[in-house]
Image (spheres, helix red, strand yellow):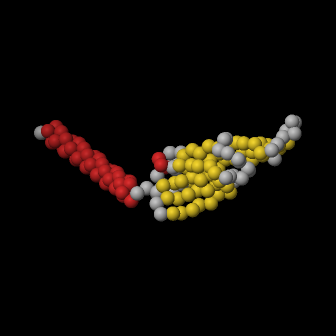
Amino acid sequence: MENKLDGSVEGHFEPSYEWQHQEGVDLLLVHLPEFKDKEGLKVQVSNCGVVKISGDGQANQTRLNFLKEIQLRKDHNVDAIKAKFEKGVLKITLPKKSTNESLNEVSNESRFKKFKKVALGVAAIVVVVSAFSGFAYYIYRTTIVKD
């Protein structure tokens, strides 16, 4: 904590959190007893699946701020995340992807892997054919020149 000239104190703190796992949804409970309302709280989700929770507020003569980043699992639907602040607890609801969505994601990955294998195979064939046709042209030219 750092004392300011006006007598106020500024400090960074690390909030505690806990997970609750339920059928089809995970709950992330972030304990923020110093905060009386949601003013100054921010929840963001990155493209990499990281939830970033930050806050900046004041309690008595103390200015408080924090930043917490938590990596989410791949089975969370990041487009449907919801957050609610109540009685000093920030409740972040993280719905899990349905099995159809998970299967679709897996099948898209396997499709890409199959496409990659086929593309590499075609590229290898093109290289071999090019080399063979170059060799055939060389033989043809050397035979004509000798005659």
Q: Which residue is depicted at the point 51% across and 49% down?
A: 81
Q: Which residue is depicted at the point 80% across and 44% down?
A: 60
Pick whichever, 141 or 116, lies toward us. 116
Q: Which residue is depicted at the point 75% across and 47% down?
A: 12
Residue 78 in view: yes
Pick whichever, 111 or 69, lies toward us. 69
Residue 135 in view: no
x, y (%) of residue 75?
Answer: 46, 57
Residue 9, by quadrant, is: top right
Q: Residue furthest front?
A: 87
Residue 2, by quadrant, is: top right
Is the C terminus in the top left, top right, bottom left or bottom right quadrant?
A: top left
Pick whichever, 146 or 50, lies toward us. 50
Residue 44, by quadrant, is: top right
Q: Residue furthest left?
A: 147
In this picture, residue 144 sits left or right of residue 94: left
Q: Which residue is depicted at the point 50% across and 45% down?
A: 47
Pick whichever, 39 or 147, lies toward us. 39
x, y (%) of residue 113?
Answer: 35, 54
In this picture, residue 106 sits left or right of residue 29: left
x, y (%) of residue 130?
Answer: 24, 44
x, y (%) of residue 15?
Answer: 69, 53
